[in-house]
Image: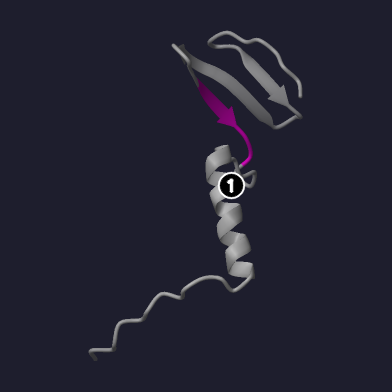
Amino acid sequence: MLTISRRQGERILIGDDIVVEIVEVSGGSVRLGITAPKERRIYREELWEQIKRENEAAAQGDFTAPVQPPDRG
């Protein structure tokens, strides 16, 4: 893991097409701005873990399909 220090307004470049900027530092919280190509998906770690669990459950057939309401045509 690369560990570096940055101040508000400073940036980190990842390759040729990703820029991470320190937008705000407040108490124990840091706000980041990320500029990346649209096709590059960016997730918070906790959201990515949830997506992974849901995908694994779906792949094992461990899910409940939504119930379709009766047609009232």
**Magenta stretch: helix, strand or loop mostly:** strand
Counting labels gives 1
Residue at 64% from the left image edge and 26% from the top image edge: 19
Q: Quadrant of the C terminus?
A: bottom left
Across and down, in percent, residue 17 comes to: 70, 32
Mark 1, residues whose alpha carbon is within 10 Å: few (<14), some, or many (≥20)? few
Which sits in the foreground, 2 or 34? 2
Residue 5, given in percent of the width and then of the height, sits at: 66, 10
Q: Quadrant of residue 6?
A: top right
- Asked whether 33 falls inside the magenta stretch, the response is yes
Q: Residue at x 67, y 19 (%)?
A: 12
- Which residue: 58% across, 39% down? 45
Q: Position of residue 44 (x, y in %)?
A: 55, 38
User: Is residue 2 rendered to the left or right of residue 53?
Assistant: right
Q: Which residues are magenta?
A: 31-37
Q: Closest to the observer: 35 or 27? A: 27
Q: Amino acid at mark 1?
A: Glu
Q: Is residue 62 above or below residue 67?
A: above
Q: Which residue is mark 1?
A: 49
Percent across and percent down for residue 33 are 53, 26
Instruction: Specify whether residue 39 is painted magenta.
Output: no
